[in-house]
Amino acid sequence: MKIIWSPLSVEKIEEIANYIREDNVNASIAWVKAVFSKIERLKRYPKSGRIVPEIEREDIREVIYKNYRIVYRVDKSRLIILTIRHGKQLLPVDDVEQENKM
């Protein structure tokens, strides 16, 4: 299964890593590596994430890592990382719909 990062998801991972880096460079690096590891595991188990409660679509799922939600879409041959959000943030519908513009 191929993994595709949406432009928004790339922007979000950079934004979060930079925020963490302000306090601790090593923690930022470890966080990014852990996120990539979580996503890599999805290649084998793409439906292991839960259905996103706000969206309630079978193909839109999320995995949680620490305080962050990694939201992705599954189709037959690819997994699209849509966004990464802090768990306390509401998920804007635009974050999910933006993948149609890719």
Image: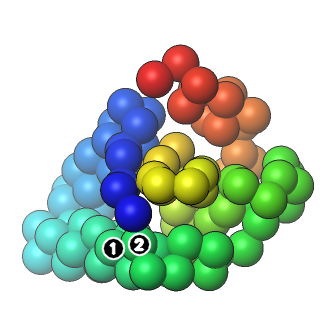
Identify the residue at horizontal 27%, vertical 46% (top origin): 14
Q: Are marks 2 and 1 in contact (CB under 8 Å)?
A: yes
Q: Position of residue 10 (x, y in %)?
A: 32, 41
Q: Nearer the viewer, residue 98 or 88?
A: 98
Residue 12 seen:
no
Q: Secondary structure at mark 1?
A: helix
Q: How far apart are the alpha carbons under marks 2 and 1? A: 6 Å
Which of these two is toward me, 99 or 30? Answer: 99
Q: Is residue 9 above or below residue 66?
A: above
* Residue type at numbered disc 2: Lys
| In front of the other: 100 or 34 | 100
Name the amino acid type tagged 1. Glu
Q: 25 or 3: nearer the eye?
A: 3
Judging by the rendered image, the residue that carries numbered circle 1 is 40
Q: Is residue 5 visible?
A: yes
Residue 1 locus on image (x, y percent) = 39, 63
Left or right side of 15 for 75: right
Residue located farthest toward the front when viewing the structure as drawn: 76
